[in-house]
Amino acid sequence: THPEHPEQDTGSSDARLVDGLRAGTPAAFAGLHDRYATGIYNLALRVVRHGPDAEDITQDVLIRAFERLPQDREVLLRPWLYRLTLNRCYDYLRGSARRPLPIASGTDLPSPQDPYEQSELQRLLEGAIGDLTRRQRAALLLKDVHGLSLVEVAACLDLTPGSVEVLLARARR
């Protein structure tokens, strides 16, 4: 491993995962699920604000990733998965535009180490990002909550890194 550069480990293991997914191996699907299901779920939950729907979106994204990973070009797996997740969430929101969105409760989250701190953090996060535009919210969640780099966020949102910086600056005001 490379403790001083952990992203190198993630990048090389993601490259192996992409190879396995392209080959259709069940172990690659299991690895995809193990590594990314929680992050996909948390992103979906923050966007759609309803646990059961976030679970459905997570499963759909994982299955789509396994079945439809681009064969003809290099793929940065994490940004590609989060972009797929956001697109699936936006499809869901368009379909449910006539229904009010329920507020996510602490019971909709994966079990945290400290339930009180997690629910307080969630309450503060929801309050802070509730009034942002869709793109500002996505950029903030991807960068600050999910830890993606500016380049990865840009890939997810189909923007330049400079545009992502502007979105983040506006979102943080």
Image (spheres, rainbow, N blue to C red):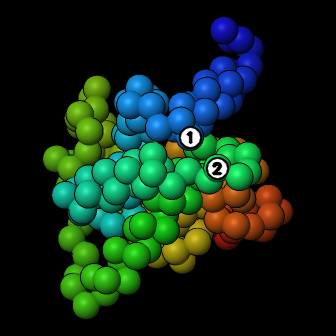
Identity of the residue drawn at 26% across and 57% down: 56
Residue 157 is at least partly visible in this image: yes
Mark 1 and mark 2 in contact? Answer it, CB < 8 Å: yes
Near-viewer residue (28 or 57)? 28
The tag on residue 149 is: none
Residue under label 2, please give it.
71
Q: Outermost residue, front direction?
A: 23
Near-viewer residue (68 or 143)? 68
Side of 5 relative to 51 (left or right): right
Helix, strand or loop at mark 1: helix
Q: Residues within 10 Å of mark 1 (few under 14, many from 20)?
A: some
Question: How far is the residue under mark 1 from the one under mark 2?
Answer: 7 Å
Q: Outermost residue, bottom direction?
A: 98
Side of 158 relative to 95 (left or right): right
Report the number of discs: 2
Which mark is first along the chain, 2 or 1? Answer: 1
Q: Residues within 10 Å of mark 2 (few under 14, many from 20)?
A: few
Could you say where residue 80 lies in the image, as x and y percent from the top left? 59, 52
The amino acid sitting under disc 2 is Gln
Residue 104 is at least partly visible in this image: no
Identity of the residue drawn at 30% across and 37% down: 117
Near-viewer residue (12 or 6)? 12
The amino acid sitting under disc 1 is Arg
Residue under label 1, please give it.
22
